[in-house]
Image (cartoon, grey):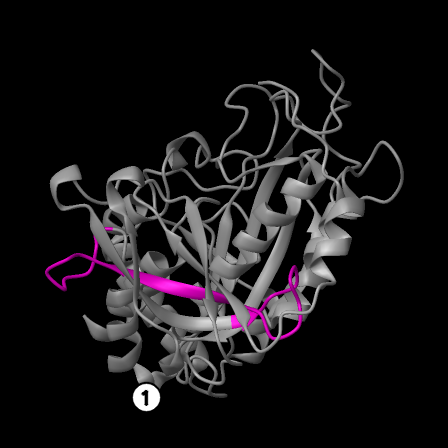
Amino acid sequence: MAKLPPSRPDLLAHYMSLDQGDSIQAEYIWIDGDGELRSKTTTVNHKVESIQELKEWNFDGSSTNQAPGHDSDIYLRPAAFFRDPFRKGNNILVIAECYNSDGTPNKTNYRHYAKKAMDLAKDEDPWFGIEQEYTLFDADGSPYGWPKGGFPAPQGPYYCGVGAGKVFARDLIESHYRACLYAGVNISGINAEVMPSQWEYQVGPCAGIDMGDHLTLARFLLARIAEDFGIVVSLHPKPFATGEWNGAGAHTNLSTTSTRTPGKGMKAIEDMIMKLEKKHAEHIAAYGDDNELRLTGKHETGNIADFSSGVANRGCSIRVPRHVAEQGYGYFEDRRPASNIDPYRVTGLCVNTMLLD
């Protein structure tokens, strides 16, 4: 891969300081046919106060693997918006759903179905938290900060590490954290991960459909900020299939009104785990591409072929935190989802399995 041209924030600063008048920029963000994020920007002639004020828009779906060339228009329906940390002011970032020309949800639009599930399960008020792991690469395709053509010291000092040689690209990570807070993403923390050049941020707790919106926006912000640093972000669940290196997951924490109720919570958690076990294969199919490379039973994972659960056990499919088991209510963690999941697909499926089937 060729070296990326340098960013020129010194030149950009002048133009970004120019007055916009009453107009704002609204950047529409969507998930394409390959699970990647896309975006385009439109001008709105007033400050946006509600999602209903934003127009339905469209794009060429034949260029994003979402439509054939003879019927290429895909329509963007605004679903949620956030403050824009790049343009600032009243400018916004818009999460949009994709619809076909006949009005049906596009094949990528798992948000549509997740929203239906959340609405049907509203009495149980499902909450989610997702731990998004990811790996950083240099523009030449090598892991960021690793010796060129070689490997760093074995895993051990990198997890939650501090100090040169133990952590990489902290400036990018801090920039992303602050941008999430500015935008209104419910980001709850960050940490360096077990493999060097791998990081994690946590989003949540978020109620219902908000989980997918907030995680998608956080992913967009990370990719967009990484542009400025000349760093490539990978959501692949197992960047190195050989060697003693951890993979990357999107551990999904779940709770409902029932699981959060003292005296009844653990029984509700046990019932939901039993339902998840019965649909293990269906969930694995929705839990990310190449996940079989990660779920090997090693490196803090359960084996993809087996369903398991346990208290404080990170080698299980489902982990119940020790404090939850002791107090008898709270949440539990599904450790199977890969780092490249569609968060709407996963949260919608979990609600369907646990609460609606």
Amino acid type, label 1: Asp
Residue 63: x and y, percent? 30, 38
Residue 262 included in the magenta stretch of the image: no
Number of other residues with Cα within 10 Å of mark 1, as a class: few under 14, some 14 to 19, many 20 or more: few
In the picture, which quadrant includes the N terminus?
Answer: top right
Any part of residue 213 in sight: yes
Q: Nearer the viewer, residue 90 or 294?
A: 90
Residue 280: x and y, percent? 28, 50
Q: Which residues are magenta?
A: 82-107
Q: Residue furthest right?
A: 163
| Residue 24 left/right relative to 179 | left
Q: Is residue 261 above or below residue 349?
A: below
Any part of residue 317 in sight: no
Residue 182: x and y, percent? 68, 69
Q: Quadrant of residue 121?
A: bottom left
Q: Residue at x 53, y 53 (%)?
A: 220
Residue 84 included in the magenta stretch of the image: yes
Residue 357: x and y, percent? 18, 70
Q: Residue furthest top?
A: 149
Q: Residue at x 82, y 35 (%)?
A: 166
Q: Is residue 241 above or below residue 342?
A: above
Q: Residue at x 65, y 48 (%)?
A: 225
> Which structural element holds mark 1?
helix
Q: Nearer the viewer, residue 72 or 174?
A: 72
Q: Is residue 287 above or below residue 352?
A: above
Task: Provide the residue designation for mark 1.
Answer: 123
Q: Residue at x 26, y 66 (%)?
A: 112
| Residue 261 left/right relative to 200 | left
Q: Main secondary structure of the magenta part?
A: loop
